[in-house]
Amino acid sequence: MARRTVNPLDIMDECVQLALGGRGATKTNPIVGSIVVKDGEVIGRGFHEEYGSAHAEVNALNEAGELARGADLYVTLEPCSHQGKTPPCTDRIIQSGIKRVFVGVVDPNPVNAGKGLEKLMEAGLEVFLGYREELCAAVIEDFTKLTLTGKPYFTLKTASTLDGKLATRTGESKWITGSPARAYVHYLRSVSDAVLVGVNTVIADDPALTVRDHIFDAEEPFKIVMDPSGRLPLGCRLLNETPEKLVYVTSPEGGKISEAVIDKGGTVLRPGMDGRYINMDALAEGLVKLGIMNVLIEGGGETAGAFFDSKLIDRGNFFIALKVMGGRDAVTCIGGEGISSVADAYPMIDPEIKRFGEDLLVHGRFTDYRKYVLDLTEKLRNRCSREL
């Protein structure tokens, strides 16, 4: 009977979908998906479910059990070869009796880059590298940025009118977009380590910044408030409903608000000032120390502008309500210092447009960390097996 075959690209597509199941739960680790295939049949699936737990390959092998001997293993990211929170995945793969390993892309972490592949091949396994590279590199852009720069991955979310207004001249902002768009924002929160707003948003809206009704099975994100002038209302919901999740970012002087945050179990960061505003690079480093790799910036215009001015925005989600509010004093979508020349504007990379009810979403990247991983994968491809 002829052996049933599978298309490695199709299996890797499914691995990527599995990997996405870990979004929002792996903290400073990458999301990874893995599948074990034997005689053309999937016998094990797994993904990295949460920080500190078993990696994707181990979960897939555990599901496959003894049937893994002589089988093929597919994984979106090069298996780790070093001891971290868990033992090296390469050791587990070798011990399982797996015959061939198909890897999406190389690990950008220099501690492991290429070493996992070499360890598997030295043990006599066939290793094939480079499957759905664009997809596999895209789902770990946050991890790649953290590895290369030591900073979190910042995603901006705004909701504005056609003329770029976040609120009317009187400050009214509820609701610019409809319920489908707002539901998607809760999904974005659920896959983020933290949600960030400026103190003006807290004063104006008193948001909770929670994931609504826990409709997405994810841990509540941290809530970061930028408040260089010490104006956070002591009666706000963030300080009184989920204080243990509050990260209060303020000037070095601190004060009674900082004391209140600490007393209630929150965290205070004092990254220092850079002119009139918070030192954004120091803030980024402080967030990583808290285990925060993905930050969703929700407001307001001045806060968004400060991150653009600091060249820290990596991805944008611009919800646009198909209406016009007007008003020279209405709040605009992006504030800050801005640029002096049109040539210096921030171009969106690979933009896409979707519709949510009556609203549009324009989303895309402002940075591209895929290239580093793709170049590294291409560089190491020739070290691996070439023919199936």
Image: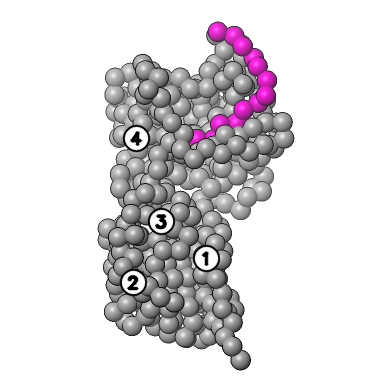
Label 3: state its secondary structure.
loop
Label 4: state its secondary structure.
helix
Q: Which mark is residue 29?
A: 3
Tell me the CA gap for discs 4 and 1: 40 Å
Q: Which of marks 4 and 1 is in front?
A: 1
The x, y position of residue 315, in whole percent, is 47, 38
Q: Earlier in the sequence, mark 1 or mark 2?
A: 1
- Dividing the image into 4 quarters, which one contains the C terminus? bottom left
Looking at this view, is 110 or 264 the one in front? 110
The x, y position of residue 100, in whole percent, is 43, 78
Q: How crowded is mark 4: few (under 14 residues within 10 Å), some or many (20 or more)?
A: some
The x, y position of residue 343, in whole percent, is 37, 22
Tell me the CA gap for discs 4 and 3: 20 Å
Q: Establish if 40 lies above or below 285.
A: below
Q: Residue 59 carries which label?
A: none
Q: What amino acid type is highlighted by mark number 4? A: Leu
Query: Does 384 appear in magenta?
Result: no
Quadrant in the rendering for residue 340: top left
Q: What stretch is highlighted in magenta?
A: 316-328
- Residue 145 visible here: yes
Quadrant in the rendering for residue 180: top right
Tell me the CA gap for discs 2 and 3: 25 Å
Looking at this view, is 5 or 222 the one in front? 5
